[in-house]
Amino acid sequence: AQKVTQAQTEISVVEKEDVTLDCVYETRDTTYYLFWYKQPPSGELVFLIRRNSFDEQNEISGRYSWNFQKSTSSFNFTITASQVVDSAVYFCALKVAGTASKLTFGTGTRLQVTL
Amino acid sequence: KAGVTQTPRYLIKTRGQQVTLSCSPISGHRSVSWYQQTPGQGLQFLFEYFSETQRNKGNFPGRFSGRQFSNSRSEMNVSTLELGDSALYLCASSPPEAGPVGANVLTFGAGSRLTVL
């Protein structure tokens, strides 16, 4: 069985601070995919990034960056210079190969960015 | 390009009733999956449909069912509603697999928020 743990329930930061959201996953499969989604108050889950288990290269996209480490089964997400618009619930999710649409989600981290 | 459309957005039912939720996927997407989101259990996979066939199913009772039509639109039905069925029901669609199964990205709709009284 797969499991995703997001230990941080809620994080509050002041605008312009950097913030890292932690994600630890468990799976026995060797081929799997990791995702981050953002859920603003409107409810829609917005896709941010996908990583496959064979690609440990870290990625930076604007103010967002992701650190994937298989050795620690972690896939952490950092927002640099946070903004109020970043306030949302962020979910880390895992999908194993062969299960086309079955995502296992973490419990989410609520990020509150204030002025 | 239109996104995933879910209707209705909000609805209120009473215990024992049944409900049908609808999902229109992005044009060209043939896979539709459903998720339930509650404060207590978080986001949980309900089932997935591909080409009108259920391809995968989560751990939910038989009161939860779904179907997919030839135009890829999907409906899910919950019969004999219980208080615990109050949740945000999210639908997601994904394009035909271009690579390994599992690599596809799901695009979610805004959800249908069901309240059971």
Image (spheres, helix red, strand yellow):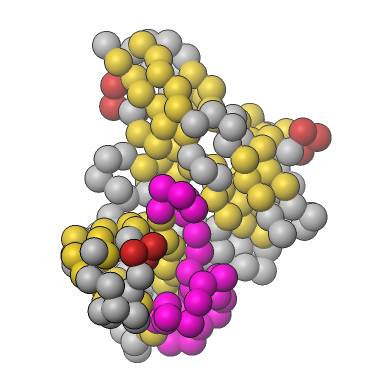
Q: Which residue is drawn at 37% across and 49% down?
A: A45
Tell me, yes or no, whether the highlighted magenta stretch contains residue A9: no
Closer to the camera, A57 or B58?
Answer: B58
Q: Where is residue A5 in the image (x, y as percent from the top left)?
A: 62, 40
Residue B52 highlighted magenta (yes or no): yes
x, y (%) of residue B70? 35, 88
> What residue lies at 35% left-to-right and 34% top-to-bottom?
A88
Q: Please identify the quadrant where the C terminus of chain A is shown.
A: top left
Q: Name the main secondary structure of what is drawn in magenta.
A: strand
B58 over A44 or under it: above or below: below
Can you give x and y, in whole percent of width and height, for residue A4 in the image? 63, 45
Q: Give the range drawn in magenta.
A: B38-66
Q: In this view, does B16 lie to the left or right of B63?
A: left
Between A11 and A46, the one lying in front of the other is A11
Instruction: Residue A18: tell me if it is visible.
Output: yes
Relative to B115, is B64 on the left or the right?
right
Q: Which quarter shows the N terminus of chain A?
A: bottom right
Quadrant of res B115 = bottom left
| Residue B27 in view (yes/no) | no
What residue is drawn where x is 40% and y is 40%? A38
Q: Which residue is drawn at 55% across and 70% down?
A: B58
On the image, the x and y values in percent for residue A99 come to 62, 68
| In this view, A109 is above or below A37 | above
